[in-house]
Amino acid sequence: MMMRIATFANSDQMITSALRTQATMATLQVQEASGLKSEYLADYGADTQHVVNLQVSVTRAQSYIDAATLADSKVQVMYSAVGQVSDVVTQLRTALSAASSGTSTGTTSAISSAQQLLEQMAGILNTQYDGQYVFGGARTSTAAVDSSSFATGTGSLSTVDTSYYQGDSELASVRVSDGQSVTYGVTADNSAFEEVMRVLKFVANSSSLSTSDLSSALDLADQAVDDVATVQAKLSDSASRIESAKSQQTDFKSYAESLATDLTSVDVAAVTAQLSTYQAQLTASYTAISKIQSLNLASYLK
């Protein structure tokens, strides 16, 4: 009994140490499995606020990236549609040039082509992306163009007519950082589109085309070609600025994630090595405890 009393303190101390080692091993096992120092922010001590700030920065950067990606997709759709507008006016110029030869067949063909191209033009300006009309300004749920009444009558080659337009004048804008927004897009009443619609309407609803009419129509078509190209250039510039801002946010996000990882992650290989050391230590501790607890006075006296 005296031997058991004498060894109690050592035995208790070794058991406490073994339990502490076991608790440390449990923590290391969680770190090894998750790759993180802790699953709880409170365990990061002085670094907690830094970790939270970095996580917020990463989330905010991702929101900017998502917004820029959506805006860039819309711009690409617009750019493609404007390319189709350029094709339309080029076809019209070709037909008008052919009609300038003075043959009735050429004139008839130009009028017929204009009728088809006017309908095609309306369809292009009613282009949708993700269920929204991209050329209608803020009125994305309403078709940007209604050519049903516009397409009647020849109108005038010299008088601006945007009666076909159903949208508003607001251009889309996307916030790409805390201090930067990029305005992009174009509406269907843009002067370049209006010029195309005006000359198409005139030619499509003419019963005949005089030399003067053909000359004026060609002049307006030529002007439209240049103005449509300008619209495409502006869209290209908007796309470039959006993509540049998106790239900057992507780089920043990667940097913030790297800093957060440095604060929250562990070296898994090092943790695995520590676990092996603690495992050997724990095994030795339990072996020693077992030896001590097996001691008794009777065995000693033998």
Image (spheres, grey):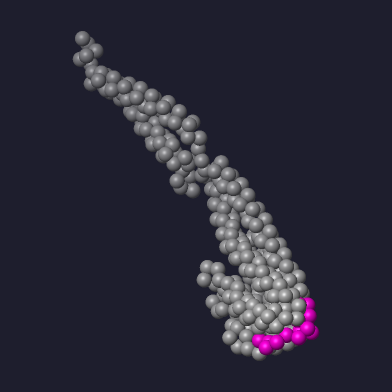
In which quarter of the view is residue 104 placed? bottom right
- What x and y, as percent, mark residue 23? 38, 35
Question: Does the magenta-highlighted stretch encompass residue 217?
Answer: yes
- What x and y, as percent, mark residue 102? 75, 81
- Tell me where the magenta segment starts and ends, as one range: 205-221
- Main secondary structure of the magenta stretch: helix
Marks counted in the figure total: 0
In which quarter of the view is residue 292 placed? top left
Q: Name the residue at 78% across, 77% down.
A: 219
Instruction: Answer above or below: position of 43 versus 114.
Output: above
In which quarter of the view is residue 67 placed? bottom right
Q: Name the residue at 67% across, 82% down.
A: 108
Screen quadrant of the N terminus: top left
- What x and y, as percent, mark residue 190? 69, 76
Which residue is more in the foreground, 231 or 93?
93
Which residue is more in the foreground, 13 or 71?
71
Name of the residue lying farthest toward the bottom: 153
Q: Name the residue at 58% across, 44% down.
A: 258
Which residue is more in the foreground, 78 or 155?
155
Screen quadrant of the C terminus: top left
- What x and y, as percent, mark residue 139? 58, 78
Instruction: Answer above or below: position of 215 versus 31.
Output: below
Which residue is more in the foreground, 153 or 6?
153
Q: Is residue 166 visible?
A: no
Q: Is residue 50 left or right of residue 15?
A: right
Q: Is residue 91 visible?
A: yes
Q: Name the residue at 50% across, 37% down.
A: 266
Question: Does the magenta-highlighted stretch encompass residue 39?
Answer: no
